[in-house]
Amino acid sequence: MTMYVYELDRVEHLRDWLALRNDVFQPVDNGLGNGSWEAIAHGEVAHFDPQLRPLVSPKSMFFSEQESLFVFDSETFATTKPKHGSQVLFGVKACDLVAISYQDKHFQQDPYYQARRQKTLLVGIDCSAPCENGFCRSVNAGPQVNENIADLILTPMPTIGGDMQGWWLICSSNNGRAAVSGMDLRPADSSWKSWREMNRRHSEAGFKSDTHIINGIQRINARAVPDEHWQQFAHQCISCSGCSQICPTCSCYTTRDLQEDDKYRRQRVWDSCQLEGFQKEASGANPSAEAGRRMYRFWYHKFSEDIALKMGRFGCTGCGRCETVCPGSVGVHSIMEKISNA
């Protein structure tokens, strides 16, 4: 489709407009240098920090951490597909948008995921600097938002004298253009493309060396990391599952049945392939009983060419969150450096 680009003085004006008809969620600082996705009502005065990326990805907005699938009353089964109103995720970074598109493909036939996803407008934002531990550039997931994975894109205008001059608003989908129809917006002049390209180059220049990432990916795909090394790496893992819980592309889950008086409810809840019982069968057989095998499986799924061939890209979007939360120092940078030197 033809992209329409406008000038925007303050992003809060756009957010408030979208909040007229939708539930709007944006990253909000918790005062500790981190943030979470919080609802912002129409008319609410709330600061928007373009640099803030919450430690928790927006994954749970679509793939719920815990949800009911159906109820059985001893005679009939009744599905409990969520009833969901329209919502906006405002200020989503490129890495998280890529992760959402990855999950869209994985859950394309899942009615529970799609009930939320189809009601969601995605407002992306171009990064002006790398995130902590981020390496999105190395895995083709940022720092600039791809027009195919967002409905609206915010890209910063140049800063003069330390003050930001405003934003360009790119309508990259029909839904995005419809969402801003009626707003008093000024069409952008043709300079926006060159300035956006300069912002991309400036952001990419701030990334640290990714040699260990590239070397690690090559060694994983060459099956060049011995099993004893994976077992050694796994000794540092305490099976907290923090990496998979925080990862925006992880989609492992299990189910459980709960009795409620004379009814039974089946729930789907997040699980992790890093936990010993994840693959355990009813017979007692467990193909990933050894911690080293679980460690290998996790990183193979993130960086293997086999997964990329099936899903269209690697399972890692370079957000670096696992490095931030891992207490055993086997997050992505730590593990890829170990693999590179193994």
Image (spheres, helix red, strand yellow):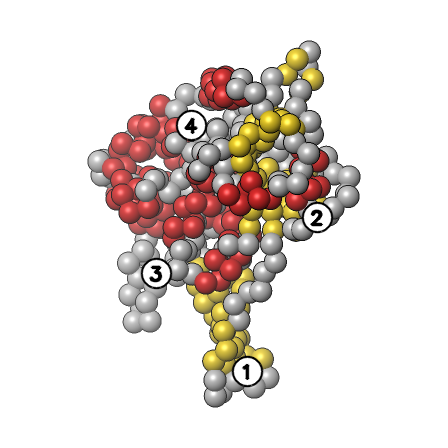
For disc 4, the marked residue is 137
Question: In front of the other: label 3 or label 4?
Answer: 4
Answer above or below: position of 269 versus 49.
below
Instruction: Characterize the local packing of mark 3: few (<14), some (14-19) or many (20 or more) Cα atoms within 10 angstroms.
Output: some
Place residue 287 in its image quadrant.
bottom left
| Quadrant of image for the C terminus | top left
The mark closer to the camera, 3 or 2, is: 2
Task: Give the CA distance from mark 3 to mark 1.
Answer: 28 Å
Report if the CB atoms under discs 3 and 2 are less than 8 Å apart: no
Q: Looking at numbered disc 1 in the image, what kind of residue is underneath it?
A: Lys
Residue at 30% across, 28% down: 215
Residue at (69% x, 17% y) in the render? 163
Q: Nearest to the eye among marks 1 and 2: give it.
A: 2
Q: In which image quadrant can residue 186 be found? A: top right
The kind of residue tagged 3 is Gln
Residue at 63% x, 37% y is 34
Q: Mark 3 points at which residue?
A: 279
**In this figure, which residue is indicated by the disc labeled 1?**
263
Q: Counting other residues with Cα less than 10 Å from the Cα at mark 4, is it few (<14), some (14-19), or many (20 or more)?
A: some
